[in-house]
């Protein structure tokens, strides 16, 4: 399956999926600690940022201050596609929802405030439904 680049098709085909659980952003000065399986990592000058399950962070005594829900946009977006992140961020911002985006090779992953993750999912589904109208 080839990656999609057309913005209308990307938004219409998002099929957002909310993963179960609670996820946190944390950082360490060295490598990933034993027993931790990050969902995502980012190497920064200040340390290694990791997105991990909250219970794993708690078990390893890792500090965090933001608890998120994890939504995957199941459309296979091209890494050079233009506008998907902006469209999603604009829609979520309009609903007063924060969003941290991590791009994978196949999909985009959104981390939203856990307490409002269902609202974020509904907002994204509504956006996708509106875009799908362009094809009917």
Image (spheres, rainbow, N blue to C red):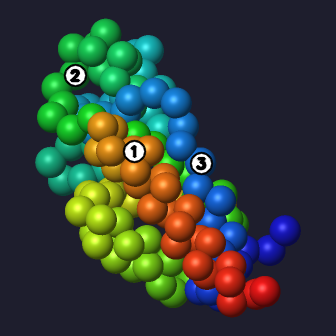
Q: Position of residue 57 (x, y in %)?
A: 30, 21
Residue in front for this viewpoint, 54 or 15: 15
Label 2: element kind: loop
Task: Kindly identify the residue that appears in the image at 62 percent across and 86 percent down.
Answer: 8
Q: Position of residue 123 (x, y in %)?
A: 45, 62
Residue in front for this viewpoint, 90 or 135: 135
Name the residue furthest top: 59
In this rendering, the answer to whether 96 lies above or below 5 is above
Mark nearer the viewer, 1 or 2: 1
Q: Report crowding for label 3: few under 14, some 14 to 19, many 20 or more residues within 10 A (C-alpha).
A: some
Question: Residue 26: in sight, yes or no?
Answer: yes
Question: Residue 102: in sight, yes or no?
Answer: no
- Residue 11, by quadrant, is bottom right
Q: Which circle's residue, 3 or 1, is located before the other in the chain?
A: 3
Q: Which residue is mark 3?
A: 17
Label 3: element kind: strand
Q: Are marks 2 and 3 in contact (CB under 8 Å)?
A: no
Label 1: element kind: helix
Name the residue furthest right: 1
Task: Kindly identify the residue that appears in the image at 72 percent across and 74 percent down.
Answer: 3
In this rendering, the answer to whether 54 lies above or below 93 is above
> What's the mark number on residue 62?
2
The alpha-carbon separation of the residues under discs 2 and 3 comes to 27 Å
135 left or right of 85? right
Q: Which residue is mark 1?
A: 117
């Amino acid at each position: 399956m080839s990656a999609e680049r057309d913005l209308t098709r990307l938004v219409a085909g998002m099929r957002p999926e909310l993963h179960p659980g609670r996820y946190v952003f944390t950082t360490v000065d060295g490598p990933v600690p034993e027993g931790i399986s990050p969902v995502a990592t980012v190497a920064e000058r200040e340390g290694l940022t990791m997105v991990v399950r909250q219970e794993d962070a708690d078990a390893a005594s890792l500090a965090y201050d933001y608890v998120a829900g994890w939504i995957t946009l199941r459309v296979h977006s091209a890494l050079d596609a233009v506008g998907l992140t902006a469209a999603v961020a604009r829609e979520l911002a309009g609903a007063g929802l924060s969003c941290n985006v991590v791009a994978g090779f196949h999909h985009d992953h959104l981390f939203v405030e856990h307490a409002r993750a269902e609202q974020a999912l509904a907002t994204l589904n509504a956006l996708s439904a509106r875009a799908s109208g362009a094809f009917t």
